[in-house]
Amino acid sequence: MLWDASALNGYAIAGIDGHIGTVSDFLLEDTSWRVRWLVISVGHWFPRREVLLPTSALGHPDAVKQEFPVRATMRQVRESPDIAAHLPVSRQMEIGLYDHYAWDPYWNSIGARAIAPWVPPTSAREPTQRDSDNAVLVADARDPHLRSVKAMIGHHIHATDGEIGHAEDFLIDDDGWIVRYIKINTENWWPGNRVLISPRSIRQIDWEEKLINLDVNRLKVKESPPYDPSTTVDGAYEETFLTYYGIKWVQP
């Protein structure tokens, strides 16, 4: 199912043993456009702060209850690292978070394993092969390109021949946790309309200037399949959209 990222902000986080906090943001990888972390605002049962949960711990949001189930306990989240002092999120911090939750990281080729019972970390545990592998990752791998979805809302969108609007929202598929579309408000160029753009149509992003450059022109965007924000993007629309832009979608 596709969700507007902004619509999920404020959803209650339902942990294994109780209410943990609320959805604050998502961190996505700007090379693959996969959501890697859910940012949770916590504070009703300990001092307010923001923590991260990997997408491997996420269930499917419930629009009726406005609730987001996660496979984590209150204690796990309470004792997880605070991200406020660790921005931007580095690969080393990601490794620390996965070790805290005792889950395999998303960059492992075998994928995330089933959620294991949580074991409190100890400073005296013996080194494992996992520790050695992680040490190599820290030394050799470049830090991931993680971006805040909330911070990207408002970025200007430029076609090859001029500006078309700004990023109003991001449509996230909760089956695989990947950004499928960017919702663009075209008010200053094409009043009264909104259009969708696939991340695969992005040529380059200037993060300092908050500018997303596309590899298609304005006419291509204007003649794309009409988008109605009040209706659900279904399979028929997606097929028409992808065919129009010549995009071959591979289900994650």
Image (cartoon, grey):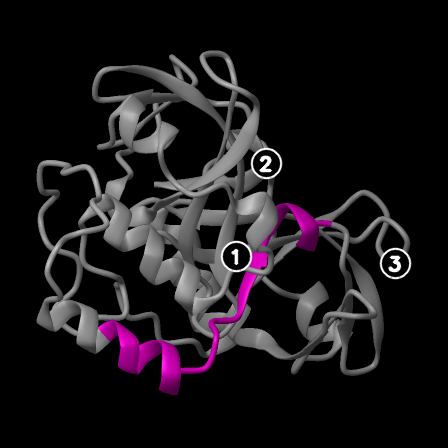
Residue at left offset 61%, top offset 52%:
226
Residue on which the image places disc 2:
6
Residue on which the image places disc 3:
189
Span of residues in magenta: 134-153
Q: Quadrant of residue 207?
A: bottom right
Residue 163 x %, y % = 84, 69
Rate crowding at label 1 as few (under 14), some (14 to 19) or many (20 or more) other CA atoms within 10 Å.
many
Q: Tag 1, which secondary structure?
A: strand
Q: Nearer the viewer, mark 1 or mark 2?
A: 2
Between disc 1 and disc 2, whose residue precedes?
A: 2
93, 39: nearer the viewer: 93
224, 101: nearer the viewer: 101
Name above or below for residue 170 compared with residue 7: below
Q: Is residue 60 left or right of residue 2?
A: left
Q: Amino acid at mark 3?
A: Trp
Residue 35 x %, y % = 42, 55
Q: Amino acid at mark 2?
A: Ser
Q: Is residue 88 visible?
A: yes
Residue on which the image places disc 1:
181
Q: Tag 2, which secondary structure?
A: helix
Q: Are marks 1 and 2 in contact (CB under 8 Å)?
A: no
Between disc 2 and disc 3, whose residue precedes?
A: 2
Q: Tag 3, which secondary structure?
A: loop
Residue 204 x %, y % = 66, 81
Please check the rendered image and state whether residue 152 is part of the magenta-colored stretch, yes or no: yes
Name above or below for residue 136 compared with residue 151: below
Residue 151 x %, y % = 69, 51
